[in-house]
Every structure is written in structure tokens, then in C-alpha cells.
Image (cartoon, grey):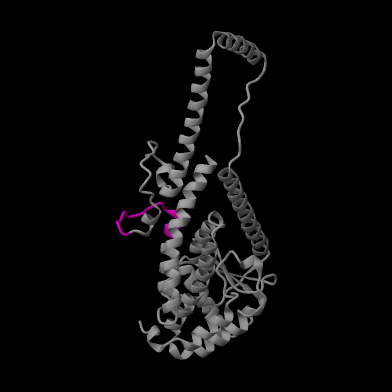
Amino acid sequence: MLKNLFYFFLNLTFMGSVTAAAVLLLRLIFNKSIKKSVFVILWIVVLFRLAIPLSIPSPTSVFNLFNNSSTQASVSNTGIADLMPNFIRDNLIYENEYNVSQDNSVYNQSKASEAESPDVAAAQDVIDNTDRKISQNTPVTSGYSISFSDIAAIIWLAGIIVLASFGGTVYFLTLRKIKKSAAFEHIVLNECKQSLNMKRHIKMLKSKEIESPFVYGIFKSKILLPESVTKADNKSLAHILMHELVHIKRFDNMLKLISSLILCIHWYNPIVWLCYVLMQRDIESSCDEKVLAVLGYNARGEYAFSLYEFASRKYSIESAGFTSFSEANTKSRISNVLNYKKVQYQQ
């Protein structure tokens, strides 16, 4: 069962990698000429390919490169096996056929030896009777040899458990800090919500134990602010709150959770890791774009200063699992804000 599940996701990671490679190529070519929100949509397509076993048959499909035309064997079972690529399925078919032929060969040899000599057949009957008596008093055990695919499936499951445990630890460490936070209210929040046409009820909390602002929760979202941010001027506070409100409006926390789960499943694929990192960067830059679209092109200098002042603080691992105003790529975000073209902010 575990091996079949591993083959199932191995097929998904193969299909998803082809889609991811196409998106990476597009991002490399058009990174400075296309809005980051477009790339976020493309990353969602990659996540879909890594999670859903759906493909459209085509004679020009790249997956046909792995079809073995010399293999005429077919699999009668349906389900997970049918979703495997042909080169994996053919290996399993060859394995089964080889085992069956070996069993038939041994069986035929034993029958031939019995036919050659009556004495041998009689001796074999004695052995069979003895084995039958022994088996009545001895529990039957069947030998099982672990193949390479079994070991690979076990390692794959172990990796999922390790990553999921790390993510769960980070999440509960953050919960402990949230419980110690206090409510915070400011009129700027309502002004920012009106600018973004948001009607959802959003709570704000402040804490001395966090280093940077971030959003917690998906449907009942809360904005957590460090004590230093709550003392900032209204303009800087508006920049931070608008950025976090865009995250909430777009349900970026849900997208980040889904991408983290897919990363846990496909952890052995380096392309998925690269896509995960670039996706988080594009999500943040996309929010910056939206904030500037509301504030106006002339506000890019002030917004870039807010990024430098509040997002360049020490990176906190507790906020790694949430959408945060502070990210490791702050320098590139400031550069993007200062170099964005005016046409990008026209609605």
C-alpha cells in the first residue's frame, strides 16, 4: 500500500515538474515585465498539477517520451496503478512476469524429476508428509525481501513526518505567543479597509515577543503587530496594515498552507523547493503591487522606506508559517517597489 502511494505521488511530481519548469522559464524571461500577481496564478497551476492526477492525452505530449513501444503487456487492475507513468508500470509488470516464470520453472523441474524416478517421487511424498506434520505444530512464516522501492517509500514517508513535525512545532510556538498578546485598536485600520473595499471583521493584536507584523488565521484572521510598530506614525502603520489586509483579502494564508503541505509530500524534488521559495516571494511582491495601486505611484518612496524600517528586522522562525510583512527578500522587494513602472498601477 505504501509503495503504491509512493508511486502515485512520484507520478504527480513528474507531471508537476514539467509544468513548474515551464513557469520557471516564463519567470526568468518576463520577471520584470509582468505583474507578480500573474506569476502567483501560474504557481497555483503548478500546485494543482502536483496535487491532482489530471492529464489531457496528446500525441505531442512530453510524457510520450517515456512510452516503451516494445512492451505489449497491460495491467488489468485499475486505480492507483493506472496513474503511474508507463516506464514505472512496465517495470512492475516485468517484475511480476519474471517472478511468475521463475515459479513455473521451479514447479516444472520438480514435476519432471518426479516423473524420472519412482523412488524420487516416493521420497518426495515422505518429505511432504513430514513437512505437513511439522507445519501443524509450527507457525507458518513467509519470507519477505525488501526491495529498493520499499526502502524509497519508507524514506519518503519519514521525510513527510519530519517536515510535518517541524511545521507543527512552529505553529504551536506561534500560538503560545499569540495567547500572550493584547488587543490593539486604531482608526487607521478602518481607513485601510475602506481603501481596499473590505467588510470583513479584522482584529489587531500587539505583542512584545514578535519581531515583525504577520497575519494569523484564514477565515477569522488577526493581524499581529510588534510593540514598536504600534508606536509608528499613521502613514507607516497604514502601509503595514494595507499589506497585511491584502494578504487577508486574497486568502494568502490558505495558499501558503496548501503549498506547505504539497512541499511536505514532494520534499524529495528540488524543483518543488525552488518553486515554493519563489512563490512566497511573488506573493509578497504581488501584495506590494496592490498596495501601491491603491496608494498611488508617488507613494512608492514612502512605502519602500516602511519596508526598510519594519521589514528589515530580525527574521523570526515563528512567523515562517504565516504571511508576514517581514521577509528574507526585503532588499529585492524594495528594489522592485522603486523600479516599478507607472503603468502597473493604473486600474
Whether residue 7 appears in this view of the structure is yes
Which of the 4 image quarters holds residue 342? bottom left
Left or right, 297 with respect to 214, comes to left
Vertical order, 14 against 131 (above or below): below
In the foreground, 103 or 230: 103
Left or right, 56 with respect to 42, comes to left
Which of the 4 image quarters holds residue 260? bottom right
Vertical order, 149 against 102 (above or below): below
Identify the magenta region: 46-60
Residue 15, given in percent of the width and then of the height, sits at 43, 57
Please, which residue is most extreme toward the left here? 59
In the foreground, 283 or 12: 12
Residue 238, given in percent of the width and then of the height, sits at 53, 81
Residue 71, given in percent of the width and then of the height, sits at 38, 44
What secondary structure is the magenta-colored segment mainly? loop
Left or right, 127 with respect to 286, comes to right
Residue 72, given in percent of the width and then of the height, sits at 35, 41
| Residue drawn at (48%, 56%) of the image | 13
In the foreground, 206 or 53: 53
Please, which residue is most extreme toward the front here? 116
Q: Is residue 50 magenta?
A: yes
Quarter of the picture holding the C terminus: bottom left
Vertical order, 22 against 297 (above or below): above
Left or right, 120 with respect to 81, comes to right
Whether residue 40 appears in this view of the structure is no
